[in-house]
Amino acid sequence: MSDQPKGFPEPPMDPEKGTLESPVHLPYAPDVKAPPPPERSPTFPSSKEKDSAVLTSTKEVVLATKPKPAGKPPKKKVSKWILWKLWFNTYRKFFTFTFGFNMIGLALAASGHWPYGAKFSGAIVVANFNFAILMRNEVFGRLLYLFINTFFAKWPPLWFRLGCTSVLQHLGGIHSGCALSGVLWLLYKVINNFRKLDVTHDAVLVMGVVTNIAVMISALSAFPWVRNTHHNVFERHHRFVGWLGLICTWTFVILGDTYDPVTRSWNLNGVALIRHQDFWFTMGMTVFIALPWCFVREVPVDIELPSAKVAIIRFKRGMQQGLLGRISRSSIMEYHAFGIISESRHAKYHYMIAGVQGDFTKSLVNDPPKTLWTRELKFAGVSNTSTLYKRGIRICTGTGIGAALSTCLQSPYWYLIWIGSEQEKTFGPTISGLIHKHIGPERLMLWDSKARGGRPDSMKLVKEAYAYWDAEVVFITSNYIGNSEIMQGCKEANIPCFGTLWDF
């Protein structure tokens, strides 16, 4: 029942995925030659020079002449252990724990070894749905990020701060585990009702089946294959069938709690109804689903079209770094998520970069709107935890700059690496101006794949920049190939990193 804004036939264009360009690999440096390793390279200054320059330098990085093509690096074989660690990440650990814990309880209840589970299976159903929806609630998410960023910034051990980021990024594992568990507990409850036909009212039986069908459709529509290849199908079914499931759940709960199987009569006493656990869990579900929609507004926008590839959408007011926003031409249909670029919380404007790839983004070019619908309460992405670290590296490709740039604009302790094709021409003076105004060359590397004639070794770049910058962590926003390549290389080199979630 979460609202993940995707729109068919848009190809995957998540703000945390940077799908417009090829993977990141080497710096766009003042010298025409690729820089040698840090200990010999004038591109990487000493720690003392770096610390003094981090707040003072505002020079532009300019590519003087077109160098020789970099060539395609050889593909390195990755160990199965590295691949397993990347696959069995915190998301899947959360899913395994929540789903496994529920299945143990379900098995005990079904076998007669847990009477509470058998008697109050309805409460367990809505408790699971309640917790699943909470994990995707923007208000809860922002409060959780605020708490972690406020109390655990920089001072705890690095392993603890990395753990905080990993937990926040992978809360979807709890969402998926509880949602699927709720579906199976509901199926168990409906089957139990049919096993007691002689004492169960027909209305309860019918609503149980209808509710089960609705929540199953909503859950199945969120499977990765559906979500990544048929976005509009996912959004419409997960949202609107989910809302139908909520209505059916209310009806099922009220009917089940007011019908007395002993006397075979209806108890319409409201006091008795509110004493049931499932009533309050369903109330919680309703609040968590409705709350984000209270922040939906139609706002004025200005759209800049620097090239045929991107649209730069400008909104009023500044934002903190690490946030993403949902926009739509309609108040309830086809919301799309994009990273937010802002100089500071007190800036006059913030921006979103939309790669022109599908129907929604093409409509921004062909028929630029003067207003768009958006949720004024933005949701936090992994970049929002950048405040936990003393120094970090932000790597992005193509339109992924929309999710990455604010972190480097608002903090002088974050190093930006951006890969694209003719960035200034493609993304225009607004984005280029923000970069060169706020990010000095001592913490900026750009790679123009067209000017460079190819892509170089990404891990050579990461390792050199990581050592030069004394970084604690690397955040990656790239396409599937680039994300996998850098994540695997970082794991092998024991460099802490967080990349795009492509499979969830």
Image: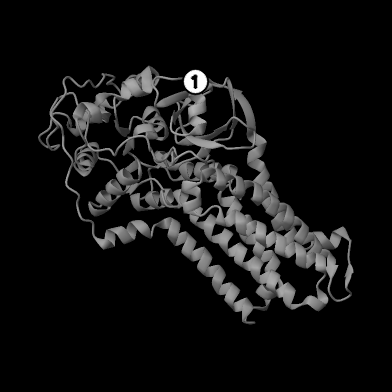
In this orientation, does residue 143 appear? Answer: yes
372 left or right, relative to 254: left
| x, y percent for residue 392 | 32, 39
Name the residue carrying label 1. Answer: 303
| x, y percent for residue 102 | 56, 68
Q: Amino acid at mark 1?
A: Ile
**Residue found 28% across the figure and 46% down from its top:** 486
Most foreground residue, 372 or 136 = 372
Query: Going by the picture, which residue comes out furthest to the bottom?
Result: 112
| x, y percent for residue 316 | 54, 21
**Residue found 32% across the figure and 33% down from its top:** 413
Q: Is residue 251 above or below residue 389?
A: below
**Residue found 43% across the figure and 33% down from its top:** 357
**Residue found 20% across the figure and 55% down from its top:** 77
Label 1 SS:
strand
| x, y percent for residue 238 | 60, 49
Asked which quadrant contains residue 36, the reply is top left
